[in-house]
Image (tube, grey):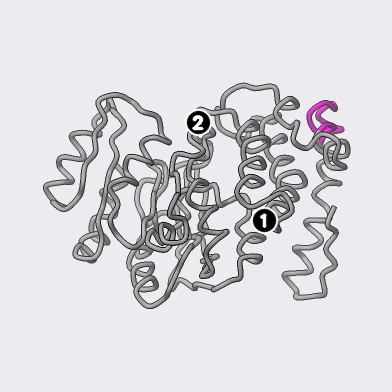
Amino acid sequence: MLINSLLSDLLQYQKNLQLIVGDNSSTDKTQKVLLDFHNQYPDVILLRHEENVGPEENFCLCLERVKSRYFWIVGDDDLPKAGVIAQVMEMLARSEVDLLYLNSEWLNHFEKSTDGERIGGMRFSRTSQKVFSEKVNVWVTFISGIIVNRERLMMLNPKLDARRFEGTSLVQLGWVLPMLVTGSNFYICSQRCILATGQNSGGYGLFKVFGSNLPAIVNEVCGTSSYMSQAVRRKLQWEFIPRLIMGTRFARVGNFAGENILASLGAFEGSLAYYLALRPLILLPKFMAYLVYAMVMLPLLFQRVLAKFKWPIFVWKR
């Protein structure tokens, strides 16, 4: 298991870190590996479910056992790079943090925490709620990249229901978004310090989750007129979903559940993006879809070039 490659980092902070592992009724060698790991790291809490309760309930059951000030849920396909845990622990010890976002490097295969690009010293930038919403945006859904202040979350949201969005494949937004709305101390590490598995199996309706569930949840928690809602909607319809559509049509994404893509994008029907980008990318022949995709991505590419050279940027709020 990937967890074995973190043993040295975990042992370094054994007195200040509680590790909880949720074994979702695995049928492979996971149980034996975890028992061996327990012999080396006795403080680990092993939660084995008698039946597969699904990933979302597994997350929630693990969360119920958390007693620490901060919590960080890492999926079984993801892995903090070597040295990341130590630097994060030191940062949390000296700073008041409500939400910390850690950027990721997506690889189709990795075996140990030293894989991928080296990160060196991590740089943590404090941001406003608006900047956090703009930069992290749809990646608030990436559960392995978010660290949450549990004490502040419960203090500011005493009636929090962690299972509020269970069944949407975005249960984590039940605690991440309330913290974003009520908190004030937001940090981002832009270095790619989490190894994430690309081309994974998914097992859910990709467009249902990001085209329907995500905008609905953000609107419900943050408000339809909030900056977060507007930022997520722009990102989804002009960049994120067009990339997913092209990846699906040209088999560059993982094996997610088959679905009617157009029907899953009803939240954007009537918008300019729906008729200029989303619908054409789905329905046009592939060579024409490529042309539309190039035209959709061109303004984004232009903005990134300007930003790289620090020239004045005029953002088109499409």
* Location of residue 213 in the rendering, given as x and y in whole percent from the top left corner: 62, 36
Give the residue at x 24% y 38%. Answer: 47
**Where's the N terminus, which quadrant?**
top left
Q: Is 283 inside the magenta-drawn segment?
A: yes
* Location of residue 104 in the rendering, given as x and y in whole percent from the top left corner: 51, 55
Give the residue at x 53% y 36%. Answer: 199
Task: Pick whichever, 215 or 306, lies toward us.
Answer: 215
Helix, strand or loop at label 1? It is helix
* Location of residue 204 in the rendering, given as x and y in whole percent from the top left corner: 54, 28
Mark 2 or mark 1, which is nearer the start of the sequence?
2
Q: Is 57 inside the magenta-drawn segment?
A: no
Give the residue at x 21% y 46%. Answer: 45
**How packed is label 1: few (under 14 Cα within 10 Å), some, or many (20 or more)?**
many
What residue does disc 2 label?
167
Residue 228's tag is: 1
Q: Is residue 166 above or below residue 141?
A: above
**Drawn side of residue 309 relative to residue 52, left or right:** right
Which region of the structure is painted magenta? 279-289
**For the residue marked with disc 2, what is the amino acid?**
Gly
* Location of residue 165 in the rendering, given as x and y in whole percent from the top left corner: 51, 38
Give the residue at x 83% y 45%. Answer: 294
Helix, strand or loop at label 2? It is loop
**Residue 49 falls in image quadrant:** top left
